[in-house]
Image: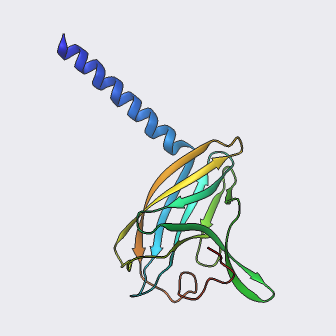
């Protein structure tokens, strides 16, 4: 009897886990997540990725154990000057379209880094998405740290009108 009960319990647990995993990843897909490596003493960097969703949603927040301060940002030209700022309200992800978070556009800023992030490191990110009805979905992503390439995003002193 215990064997049957244990088997039934294990089957139920596996079914619930499978449904939870399917539900957690059914609405939002994140691909090619990466973080730009830093140099010693650098206190910020950026994360990039491709996001798509089955229905209209938006990326409203991000967190990581690497730093206490992570924000959704964008770079934009204003009065002939490239400025970086936090995105109020999040980044829209229209149904069926892919949104690229890139060094020259929308991205995630990792601020107040306590230590250097080096090429090959893995940075865990928790992304929070919200649909039009206000329902939130959390997506866990592991971003690989890639080499610096000389672009401005994530470099010291390139925060424009960023405010903490």
Q: Quadrant of residue 146?
A: bottom left
- Determine the residue positioned at 40% across, 29% down: 16
Q: Quadrant of residue 123?
A: bottom left
Number of numbered discs: 0
Is the N terminus in the top left, top right, bottom left or bottom right quadrant? top left
Examine the rendering and report whether any part of residue 106 can be seen: no
Is the C terminus in the top left, top right, bottom left or bottom right quadrant? bottom right
Q: Nearer the viewer, residue 88 or 19?
A: 88
Picture coordinates of residue 78, whole percent (x, y): 78, 83
- Determine the residue positioned at 36% across, 78% down: 119
Relative height, residue 61 to residue 10 (above, below): below
Relative height, residue 63 to residue 105 (above, below): above
Examine the rendering and report whether any part of residue 53 can be seen: yes
- Determine the residue positioned at 50% across, 45% down: 25
Protein image colouring:
rainbow
- Determine the residue positioned at 69% across, 48% down: 56
Picture coordinates of residue 53, whole percent (x, y): 61, 50
Task: Name, please, the residue furthest toward the right.
Answer: 79
């Amino acid at each position: 009897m215990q064997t049957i009960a244990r088997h039934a319990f294990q089957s139920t647990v596996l079914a619930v886990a499978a449904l939870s995993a399917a539900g957690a990843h059914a609405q939002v897909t994140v691909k090619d997540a990466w973080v730009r490596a830093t140099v010693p003493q650098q206190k910020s960097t950026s994360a990039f990725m491709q996001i798509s969703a089955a229905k209209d949603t938006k990326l409203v927040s991000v967190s990581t154990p690497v730093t206490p301060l992570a924000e959704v940002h964008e770079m934009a030209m204003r009065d002939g000057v490239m400025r970086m700022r936090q995105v109020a309200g999040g980044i829209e992800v229209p149904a069926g379209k892919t949104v690229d978070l890139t060094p020259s556009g929308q991205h995630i800023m990792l601020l107040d880094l306590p230590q250097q992030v080096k090429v090959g490191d893995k940075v865990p990110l928790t992304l929070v998405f919200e649909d039009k009805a206000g329902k939130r979905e959390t997506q866990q992503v592991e971003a690989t740290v890639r080499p610096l390439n000389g672009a401005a995003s994530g470099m010291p002193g390139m925060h424009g009108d960023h405010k903490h």
